[in-house]
Structure formats: C-alpha cells, structure tokens
Amino acid sequence: MNKKLHIRFISIILAILLLIPSLNVSASDPELPDQPSADIPTAAEPVFEGDAKSLILIEASTGMVLYENNADEALPPASVTKIMTLLLVMEAVDRGEIKLTDPVTVSEAAASMGGSQVYLEVGEQLTVEEMIKCVVIASANDAALALAELVAGSEEAFVAEMNARAQALGMENTHFENTNGLDDTTENHVISARDIAIMSAELMKHTTILKYTTVWQDSIRNGAFVLTNTNRLIRFYPGANGLKTGSTSKAGFCISAAAKRDGMQLIAVVMGSSTRDSRNETAKQMLNWGFANYARITVSNQEELRIPVSGGKQTTVSADYDSFDLIVSKKNAKKLETDVQLNESAEAPVCVGDPVGKMVCMIDGEMVKEVPIYATEAVEKNTFGSLFLRILKKYLQI
C-alpha cells in the first residue's frame, strides 16, 4: 500500500471512530399535537318547524354535530330509553354471554308491565331474537324487562349497568331508573338529546340491530301476533334505518331517527314534541337538511411515501397513514386540501408504527383534521461492525 493510500485508509478509520458516539444516541421523533375536532364550517343555521324542546343532528361514524338546539337539557325520554337497554343486550350477544337463539322465560314482573307491550304471559318463552324484535319494532315494555332480567338477573342490576354504561360513554346528563322509560312513578329518569345521540351511534355499531330496526312489520308466536314499527319513518322516509320512538304525557313525543344515504349515517334526535306528527316532521326536516348540506369524503393515501433514515442499515423507510372519513358541508367540499408533512429524517432504529410526520386537512387555510404518518417497516440501527463493513466495501471498490 503506497503512502498516499495508507493515509487515506487511516482517515476513513478515524471517521468511523468519530461516528461511534452518535450510534448510541436515539433522537426521539417529534410529538404530534392532539388532533382537533373536525370543526368544519357549516351551512347556514336552519329553522325547523315544530315545538320540540330539544334537538340534535349528528353524523354517526364521526360523532360530528351538524345541528343542535338545547341539546344538553336533561328531559324524560320515554321509550327512547330502550336504546340503552338494546345496547346492553347487543353487547352481551357480541361477547357471547347470550345467543340470539337462547330461550327467554317470562317472569311475573315482566308479564305485569303496562304501557306498550306484546302481552307476554308468565312462563312463556320467546328467543332472544324475538324479544329484541318486540322491543325494537313494537316498543314492548314487557320484552325489555324480560331481556334485562336475562342479562343481569334483575331489573335493578340491569339499571345499574345502564347507568354505568352511560357514564363510560360520556353521557353527562343521563340517569336511568328503569329499562323502558315509563315515567309515572319515576323521580329522575332523564337524558339529554346529545346523550341519546351518543348511545344511538354506539348501538348502531352493532350492525345486527339493523336487521330489526329497518323492519316495518313482523310477527311472533308463529305469525299469530303482528308487530308494526312505531317508527313510521322506516316506511315513508328514504334511507331510514332506525332507531326508536317514545311518548308519555310527561316526555311528550320523542324519537331517535336514523337514516343513511350515500354512505353517510345521520341520527336526528327530537325530544318533547307535542304530537307524533310534529315529532316525525321535525325529524324528517333535520335529516333532509343534513343530507342536503353535508357529504362524507374518504381521505386515503395515493402515493408512495419515504423519508431518509440516519444511522440505519438502510437509508430510507416507507411511510403511510390510515384512511379516514370527513363530514364536510357540500359548499366546502371542493375547498378541502391535504398537506403531507414528513419529518426531514428518522433516526435508527425505526419500528413499524413509529410516527414520522403528519397529514393535515384544511379548508380555507383552517385545519379541520390531522392524522399521524407512521413508518410501515422496521430499520435496524447500524453497529460499528456493519458500518465498518459498508465503508470497507466501498473503499475496496475504488
């Protein structure tokens, strides 16, 4: 080896030694700020006809509120209560604790329920599925209690579960005293329109419920007893797929009306209307307004993303972000812009799922959604040996 080449080789070795301290330092990726709520500019505030005490309109998959009026006042909900009853039942089914085909034996307490009912008799047996149909379609108080007793052993225990589940869902203006919403003897059986929307959206995650909430007429007892849906929107409103009505002299006429069009699931809650027709008309107007003014947009990555890696066994790493839905007012849909913001580089080692940037959605320069961009492959950190071999190979090729 001549003198010039020898000096060059020593210089390379010294350069490697100088890099060794940095190999033990792992730079942390920048922390992404909390994602803001999709506070997207909305269409002009509507004025809905009717005399309801409380209203709210949401999009179910995102929970985005499209309209609200006095949505947090705690009011008697009548049979809309049964949405929580059905939620606990469907959760028990999905956990495998009960099956749709299981028989439910009617207790004396269930058979003695008043109000809307399917006239269950003590000792009579219907399947869980048949009981659910009775609750959803005919708003049967007796079937609601029979299911509650099956799931929790007693109405008291089931009501405790209802209140616990409401708290877990963040329903801040809710207190249940029974499974059905009868309020002749209750003292504080109340819920807000916002809380009804929350539990409605949660129930609709259990898609099996849609087998029953979309039915106009069915029957039990081998066709001897006909069930007709108390929710007339199921028959007369295009896209209607639920969810529950209710009325008492104390609560007035209430509804959680669900409908889906063009992939967008809306839930309109109306509480305290003076008549059934007024309640239904208000719900229809809210749904019409929502579908006319909003659209669902799916945002997904359409390009290959890579960023440089320092100190790694490979020089770049691939990246991606999860697709998501945005609910935007139709007048702003064409203004939606996306901005991929990748970090300048990542420090090895890189693990799958490590944040390496963010994707920001904006309308008129205002951020409406932010999601993390993450590494989709792992990159091991260079060791002294691997770095030495890499440089030596390069040197020997000269």
Image (spheres, helix red, strand yellow):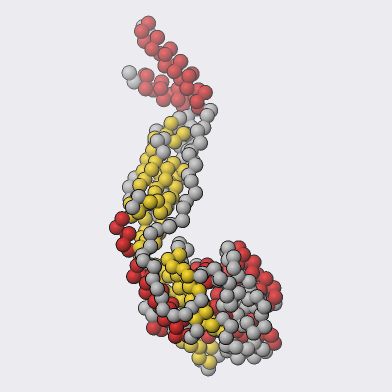
| Spot occupied by residue 381 in the image (x, y as percentages of width and height) | 48, 32
Observer-nearest of 261 and 34: 34
Observer-nearest of 253 and 53: 53
- Tell me: 42 left or right of 18: left
Whether 44 is drawn above or below 347: the answer is below
| Spot occupied by residue 343 in the image (x, y as percentages of width and height) | 41, 38
Whether 377 is drawn above or below 386: the answer is below
The residue at the far top in this view is 3
Report whether residue 366 is seen. yes
- Tell me: 95 left or right of 283: right
| Spot occupied by residue 176 in the image (x, y as percentages of width and height) | 63, 74
The residue at the far left in this view is 334
- Residue shown at 35% from the left, 63% from the top: 329
- Tell me: 45 left or right of 352: left
Total numbered circles? 0
| Spot occupied by residue 254 in the image (x, y as percentages of width and height) | 51, 79
Whether 292 is drawn above or below 135: the answer is above
Pick the quarter of the image with the N terminus.
top left
Pick the quarter of the image with the C terminus.
top left
The quarter holding residue 292 reads bottom left
Observer-nearest of 169 and 24: 169
- Residue shown at 63% from the left, 89% from the top: 114
- Residue shown at 44% from the left, 68% from the top: 67
- Residue shown at 53% from the left, 94% from the top: 224
Report whether residue 255 is seen. no
The residue at the far bottom in this view is 224
